[in-house]
Image (tube, rainbow, N blue to C red):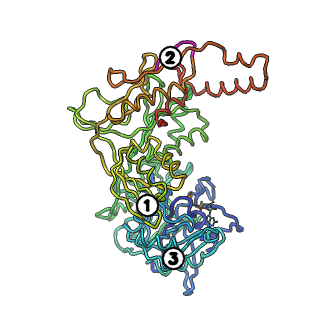
Amino acid sequence: MKRIRNFSIIAHIDHGKSTLADRLLEFTGAVNLGGKMGQILDSMDLEKERGITIKAHAVRLKYKAEDGNEYILNLIDTPGHVDFSYEVSRSLACCEGSLLVVDATQGVEAQTVANAYLAIDHNHEIIPVINKIDLPQADPERVKKQIEDILGIDSSEAILASAKEGIGTKEILEAVVKKIPPPKGDPQAPLRAMIFDSWFDNYLGVIILVRVFDGIIKPGMKIRLMATQKEYEVQRLGILTPFPKDIEQLSAGEVGFIIAGIKNISDTKIGDTVTAVESPAQQPLPGFREVKPMVFCGLYPVETNQYEELKSSLEKLRLNDSSFFFEPETSAALGFGFRCGFLGLLHMEIIKERLEREFNLSLISTAPTVRYKIVDKKGEYLIDNPSKIPKIYERIEEPFMKVSIIVPEEFVGEILKLCQERRGIQKEFSFISKDRILLVYEMPLNEILWDFYDKLKSLSKGYASMDYEFIGYRASDLVKLDILINGEQVDALSVIVHKDKAYYKARAIVQKLRTVIPRQLFEVVIQAAIGSKIIARESIAPLKKNVLAKCYGGDVTRKKKLLEKQKEGKKRMKQIGRVEIPQEAFLSVLKIE
Ligand code: GTP
């Protein structure tokens, strides 16, 4: 065990984590990239080798150090986005140290801070790596100072590197060997191994990646997953180099994969403990938590006959992603579809994009919403769809987040205004360097869904970075805003808003809808209502002439183009009563000023 080092790389997005991982793999001879950047750990490309899909979220590297000894280095990858912070924390729990990569031109950003604190919480030995020193704007001294001032991490021995040019790779590997402590653990104790990743392979079923903390695991052993209490027999054990290689055992301190005939990925929960059925561990490893979706939306096929296809695509996606949730839902406006739950906004975007791209589906999605807690005489319960809010209730609670933002001083005024508009409660305002400010706010997740990230980026010309975490439910003065089109309530357009903003939002939504709903042959009236009270109204005058009239006798290609456009647009229309509503309308409620 003393020649094993388990470590991960943490960084803000785009600071060079994948490129550095590639360098480490290349330097230790795990792969030969021929000098090209391959982004091996990043590849979702389900490459096949010996019948196992490679999703190399843990690679075992062999490294002959300057002290003459050969070390086993397990590099455990961490997902790179705020939505997956629980999974990041589980990956970190499996390591004794981490490389903190900071871009020498950008400096410390919001996710650098969030990830570094996670690593500190796990008592990691943290090795700062200042990357991209090949760039002319690189300012490593400034970044070193930030690392000390903001994170309180000693940066006197920070390694200056260029992952792109391979500068500093050897120094990094030496630091991993010298500074990160070897794993502890008792090979004689009852088996305890933590699941930090799992995925589904068509041939082998579920494959789980584990770090063994105590005991030994061998093929043929009966194992129990402690959270789900499911039992299986180990069929194969292996390591990823990054290519899968079978081995005879995994012992305390080691990292590898287990194949045990598991059919259902929801049985293999990230953070759960694997133990042996014979002489099981008394206690699971600490820190297990079930992840719950935070953001919901309705997904409906544009063509009703694609319902079954959508269903089977969702099922396929879920095979590989147990944090994603869906159930059938019907909407008066949109017909048969699914209510889907995601860890966060990015997670939602990823799934939506995969459905459209990989499965070739044309979808209508409703505006994302959070899960509200309703308290009424039935008790306390959660609802994930605004249209399900009961008429009478005692109070509504909504999820609040702690939002950390790092922003250059010149933009701070605008950002403060934005946070205030979004019902943020300021908790911290501090200079982290001469010209950059760390803001911490408590803010309803609902307000973050409404275009917050885009606004943050545009108001700061792209310089602000952000991270958020869930802190709990809080009571708020919320109302349901319904939208009626020609007198018919469109359930899929209902939103929940704060009472103080209801009038303003209602007006903005009906005005927006007026611009996105095409003119029809009759007048279209758009109204917003709270209960039975109409609080805003707009109308669209009927269409008089044919859209193509102006092209008659004119340019034929232009006419063709217009028709093409119409056809495209038509595909995404939904008929509400007699009115055709484009997909854009269902999301437009989010994109209002
Ligand atoms: P995500 O995978 O998006 O989280 O990003 P990452 O942190 O893994 O960064 P990645 O390795 O994808 O690098 C981001 C960009 O920076 C890429 O365009 C790289 O080519 C570039 N890059 C990485 N390291 C260096 C470096 O040392 N110097 C320079 N000039 N560019 C680099």
Query: From mark 1 to mark 3, how far is it between C-alphas?
Result: 23 Å
Mark 3 lies within 8 Å of ligand 1 (Cβ measured): no
- Residue 213 occupies quadrant: bottom left
- Residue 522 occupies quadrant: top right
Residue 6 drawn in magenta? no
Mark 2 and mark 3 lie on one chain; the one further toward the N terminus is: 3
Q: Which residue is mark 2?
A: 524
- Please, what secondary structure does the residue beneath circle 3 have? loop
Type of amino acid under label 2: Val
Q: Residue 426, image x and y in percent?
A: 34, 53
Q: Could you tell me which residue is drawn at 52 percent across and 64 percent down?
A: 58
Q: Nearer the viewer, mark 2 or mark 3?
A: 2
Which stretch appears magenta? 520-526
Query: From mark 2 to mark 3, how far is it between C-alphas?
Result: 64 Å
Q: Is residue 252 visible?
A: no
Q: Which residue is mark 1?
A: 437
Report the front residue among 514 and 491. Answer: 514
- Circles 2 and 3: CB atoms closer than 8 Å: no
Task: Classify 10 Å Cα crowding around label 2: few (below 14), some (14-19), many (20 and above).
Answer: many
Task: Classify 10 Å Cα crowding around label 3: few (below 14), some (14-19), many (20 and above).
Answer: many
Name the quarter showing ligand 1. bottom right
Q: Which residue is mark 3?
A: 158
Task: Classify 10 Å Cα crowding around label 1: few (below 14), some (14-19), many (20 and above).
Answer: many
- Please, what secondary structure does the residue beneath circle 2 have? strand
Q: Could you tell me which residue is drawn at 46 percent across and 16 percent down?
A: 486
Q: Residue 431, image x and y in percent?
A: 41, 64
Type of amino acid under label 3: Ala
Question: In the visual, does 442 lie left or right of 18?
Answer: left
Query: From mark 2 to mark 1, how far is it between C-alphas?
Result: 48 Å
